[in-house]
Image (tube, grey):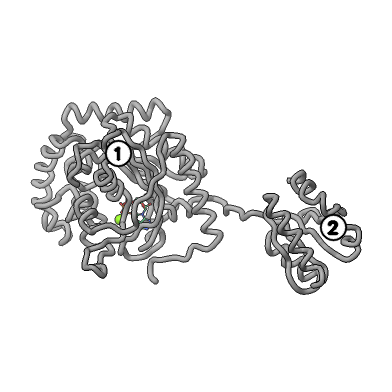
Amino acid sequence: MRGTHDILPDQSRAHRRIRETARELAERYGYAEMSTPIFEFTEVFKRTLGETSDIVTKEMYTFADRSGDQITLRPEGTAGIARALISGGLGQSLPLKFFYSGPMFRHERPQKGRLRQFHQIGVELLGAASAMGDVEVIALGDQILEALGIRGRTRLELNTLGDSASRAAYREVLVAYLISHRDGLSEDSAKRLDRNPLRILDSKDKGDREVVDGAPLFGDYLTDDARAFFDRVRAGLDDLGLAYLINPRLVRGLDYYCHTAFEYTTEHLGAQGTVLAGGRYDGLIETMGGPPTPGVGWAAGIERLAMLLDEQVPAVKPVVVIPVGDEFEAEAFRVTQRLRLAGIAADIGFSGNLSRRMKRANRMGAAYAVILGSDELARDAATLRDMETGAQEEVALDKLVDRLTQRR
Ligand code: ATP
Ligand code: MG
């Protein structure tokens, strides 16, 4: 199906490395793994993402289930976690720090780095209003990219959307500007002019971009408080030696986003250059009917991160047991199973003559072959062959596990 992929073993290992590296580092920063359902009531996403967002207006997989409930396959992770916080009454013990990973679904035009089922890792820090929270989630993202060896191919872009007073002031001048350039705007954006003008800053339409390039800058309308918050975030990043670029055009169009917005972008993936994106969303939980709860977090696309990994993630190299002749298969199976029980990855090279079985062991990426022929077996032994060097030695069967453990 368009926009979906089978994730074959090579790719699966890359995904796993990304997930595991992220989960391990997230735990180091105190973020516990959690997961929410892959589908929720459509309302959950409509409320959190906003009726006018791209995701809600054109990207959601929404359908009525057999009981007639409106269901949506989750397009992102934050809404579900916010819903869980409210419905599970988790809000009693703030702050809370969560890590998640899993599939997301968006009905988009498939292209490189843009799928309809894709996968994300993400973190949320809930109940922390301090600028140090923003610094912490960015530091965690940074360390994950570093550990994956791809930080050097990305850059951190940073901006602030201020507080609600800043946004109200900015909204006014922005709308005035956009109205005076209405002719240059796309149909979508012209519609957003009343309901959600900030969203237009986010538009990927070429005509919109040209209009937006001349728009007044958010930074000129920040309140003193909002500016002070941004200064604290910047000082925190400076203090940790985390390099960033201020991008005054970086926005998230939704009302509950505030203060920090950030993205790690790369020039190595063509048009789909954002690998990790996030920001502060202090108004979100309240929008969903929960108690006022500040929040900050990010999400990163696993497929895009995987494209930036510079080497394949190697498969486990097994020991391949090779019976020389079908009559030794039962013995080969016993030996294989003994290795597996001892914690050694082992497989068996079935059928054909010795050279076919050796070829097969090679194809399986074997580190060692254990060859069971009649001569060796008569002495309760096997030939152990180092597949890399070709060196062979005879090893007693009851010493095989020790010998292999030693060698590794
Ligand atoms: P874009 O500008 O690429 O559409 P977005 O703003 O919709 O991104 P977010 O909702 O912030 O993206 O999602 C966070 C990350 O998830 C993105 O930076 C990207 O790495 C990944 N992502 C988003 N949509 C897709 C998709 N359709 N296919 C693959 N990865 C995606
Ligand atoms: Mg998108």
Q: Position of residue 90 (x, y in %)?
A: 29, 40
Q: Secondary structure at mark 2?
A: strand
Which of 155 and 286 lies nearest the eye of the viewer? Answer: 286
Mark 2 highlights which residue? 383
Q: Is residue 303 left or right of residue 211?
A: right
Q: Answer whether residue 151 is visible to the viewer in this image.
A: no
The three-letter code of the residue at mark 2 reads Thr
In which quadrant is the N terminus drawn?
Answer: bottom left
Q: Position of residue 176 (x, y in %)?
A: 8, 46
Q: Is residue 139 left or right of residue 66?
A: right
Q: Answer whether residue 1 is visible to the viewer in this image.
A: yes
Which of 237 and 408 lies nearest the eye of the viewer? Answer: 408
Q: Residues within 10 Å of mark 1 (few under 14, many from 20)?
A: many
Q: Ligand 1 within 8 A of label 2's CB?
A: no
Q: Is residue 332 above or below residue 247?
A: below
Q: Residue at x 81, y 68 (%)?
A: 328
Q: Is residue 71 above or below residue 253?
A: below
Q: Is residue 362 left or right of residue 162?
A: right
Mark 1 highlights which residue? 296
Which of 120 and 209 lies nearest the eye of the viewer? Answer: 120
Mark with earlier residue (2, 1): 1
Disc 2 and disc 1: Cα gap in Å? 59 Å
Q: Position of residue 195 (x, y in %)?
A: 11, 52
Q: Secondary structure at mark 1?
A: strand
Q: Which mark is residue 264?
A: none
Residues under numbered marks 2 and 1 in contact, where contact means CB atoms less than 8 Å apart: no
Q: Residue at x 87, y 54 (%)?
A: 394
Q: Residues within 10 Å of mark 2 (few under 14, many from 20)?
A: many
